[in-house]
Structures are given as C-alpha cells and as structure tokens.
C-alpha cells in the first residue's frame, strides 16, 4: 500500500480522536456547571436532580464517544481494505466491440 492511502485512514482516525476530545471536554464542562448548580440548590430534590443530570451527561457523552470511535475505526478499516483491494485487483478492461 502506498503512503498516501495509508495516510487517509490515519486522517479518519485522527479526526475522530479530535471530535471525541471536543465531546468529552464539552461533557465535562456541562457536568461541572450542573454540579455547581447542585451545590447552590436550595432544596434536596433540586440538588438530587442536578446531580442526576450531571451523571447522566457524562454517561451519555461516554456512550456517544464510544460509538464515534467504533464508527471511525470501521470507516478507516473499510477504506484501507477497499484501497488494498483496488491495488491488488487488476483493472477491469472493457470487452471489445463486435463488428457486424
């Protein structure tokens, strides 16, 4: 496999890695905001609700990050396989035209 083809599947993985970092950072930021709201809450129910939302945010973000990672790996692997197949298979030639 040529270097250019290898680089594109690496690019797919790299983009996913960056997206996962952004997703995780946003989830942590939201978690922190919700925990701060829980700390400032006046009653027990509001405090519990904010803590529950904070926990659910992290769990949902982790699940989304896993799905994103799996999807990116599948896409990168599929791309690499298709390029390898294209390199290994000879080009298909068109059949000669029949003369009447």
Image: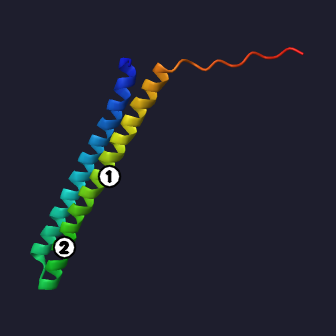
Between disc 2 and disc 1, whose residue precedes?
A: 2
Of residues 76 and 27, the one nearer the viewer is: 76
Q: Quadrant of residue 51?
A: bottom left
User: Which residue shows up at 54% across the image and 17% down it?
Assistant: 90
Element under disc 1: helix
User: Counting other residues with Cα less than 10 Å from the Cα at mark 1, is it few (<14), some (14-19), or many (20 or more)?
Assistant: few
Residue 91 image label: none
In the figure, is residue 20 to the left or right of 87?
A: left
**Residue named by callout 2:** 52
Q: Is residue 70 above or below residue 56?
A: above
Any part of residue 43 in sight = no
Q: Is residue 84 above or below residue 59?
A: above
Q: Quadrant of residue 41?
A: bottom left
Report x, y in % for residue 18. 27, 41
User: Which residue shows up at 17% across the image and 81% down it?
Assistant: 46
User: Which residue shows up at 24% across the image and 55% down it?
Assistant: 26
**Residue named by callout 1:** 67
Element under disc 2: helix
Report x, y in % for residue 67. 32, 52
Report x, y in % for residue 15. 32, 38
Any part of residue 60 in sight = yes
Q: Mark 2 vs mark 1: give the one in front.
A: 1
Of residues 57 and 68, the one nearer the viewer is: 68
Q: Quadrant of residue 93?
A: top right
In the figure, is residue 20 to the left or right of 46?
A: right
User: Counting other residues with Cα less than 10 Å from the Cα at mark 2, is it few (<14), some (14-19), or many (20 or more)?
Assistant: some
Task: Indicate the quadrant containing the C terminus: top left, top right, bottom left or bottom right.
Answer: top right
Distance CA(mark 2)–CA(mark 1):
23 Å
Task: Indicate the quadrant containing the N terminus: top left, top right, bottom left or bottom right.
Answer: top left
């Amino acid at each position: 496999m040529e270097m250019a083809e290898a680089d594109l599947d690496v690019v797919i993985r790299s983009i996913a890695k960056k997206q996962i970092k952004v997703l995780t950072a946003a989830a942590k930021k939201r978690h922190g905001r919700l925990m701060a709201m829980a700390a400032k809450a006046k009653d027990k129910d509001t405090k519990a609700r904010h803590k529950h939302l904070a926990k659910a945010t992290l769990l949902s973000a982790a699940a989304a990050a896993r799905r994103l990672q799996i999807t990116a790996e599948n896409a990168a692997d599929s791309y690499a396989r298709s390029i390898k197949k294209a390199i290994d298979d000879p080009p298909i030639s068109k059949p000669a035209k029949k003369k009447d």
